[in-house]
Image (tube, rainbow, N blue to C red):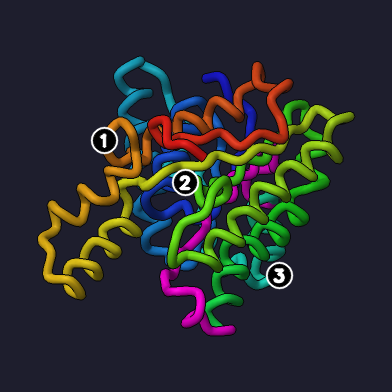
Amino acid sequence: MRLAGAHAVVTGGGTGIGAAIARTLAAEGAKLTLIGRRREKLAEVAQSIRLSQAQSDAAGGVEGPGADEGVEVCAADVTDRAEAERAFAAARAANGPITILINNAGAVENAPFARVTEDSWRAMMAVNLDALFHCCQAAFDDIVAAPAGRIVTIASTAGLRGYKYSAAYVAAKHGAVGLMRALALELAETNATANAVCPGFTDTDIIADAVAAIGAKTGRDEETVRARFASFNPQGRLVTPQQVADAALFLCLPGSQSITGQALAVAGGEVM
């Protein structure tokens, strides 16, 4: 229970990487607030965490917390400043000051640069960069005051290199990495750190949707399309959400206090 007493807010906590991070932090004793647009997905993850905790407590002969204690959910669109501030206020009211912020909410749209619309560009900036601004400011005072405050942003290898047909996403993720580097310096004289985790292609719903779309457009079978994504990774496989969650956990632990302003690639050795 290396995070006992911590309160972690996880955005985009209802699926994929966010859900894996939530479960991993909870297993280390952190209280959680899960924020996302779909309450039903957040509730599913929260319930799975509660059941896991209850089973663990029962196996160890320990009387655990009540079913609703320590895991809060809040439906909100963190691209909207007012909604983000409302969600963070609710998190604080439920679980106390925020000591860990996991910025995981994100989305991707692909198109040749000449066909990127202004609306698409703004949408990519809103969810992948503006949301970080809102969430970091909403949690900032708590993070600074915490004995071991942590900001971990789930960026992407797209924040470290370029990819074709993803100009808006690449630009936003570079901004996400840059924001963490700037915050790391502002926080350097406190007990808080700010870092980015940059996964390569990861086996989530985003990849599943991309595989389906490419298959429908090109007629290629699912196995072939998935293999193409996996080929970016020198290890020849997609990254798993749990591998990303383990990297995020490492940056949240008390012993990581001298690691800040970094962009940790979880990509099997992909050259940036």
Residue 121 within the magenta-colored segment of the rendering:
no
Measure the alpha-carbon separation of dots 1 and 3: 40 Å
Q: Which comes sooner in the sequence, label 3 or label 2? A: 2
Q: Mark 2 points at which residue?
A: 68
Dot 3 crowding, Cα within 10 Å, few <14, some 14–19, many 20+: some
**Residue 197 picture location, percent across and down:** 55, 39
Residue drawn at the location 65% of the way across and 21% of the way down: 256
Q: Mark 1 points at which residue?
A: 236
**Image position of 193 with respect to 46: above or below:** above
Residue projecting furthest to the right: 189
Q: Is disc 2 in contact with disc 1, using a CB cutoff of under 8 Å? A: no
Q: Mark 3 points at which residue?
A: 81
Dot 1 crowding, Cα within 10 Å, few <14, some 14–19, many 20+: few
Measure the alpha-carbon separation of dots 3 and 2: 27 Å
**Residue 57 picture location, percent across and down:** 37, 23
Amino acid type for the residue under numbered disc 1: Gly
Q: Is disc 1 in contact with disc 3, using a CB cutoff of under 8 Å? A: no
**Image position of 41 with respect to 246: above or below:** below
**Residue 102 picture location, percent across and down:** 59, 45
- Whether residue 18 appears in this view of the structure is yes
Q: Is mark 2 on a helix, strand or loop?
A: loop
**Image position of 115 with respect to 62: above or below:** below
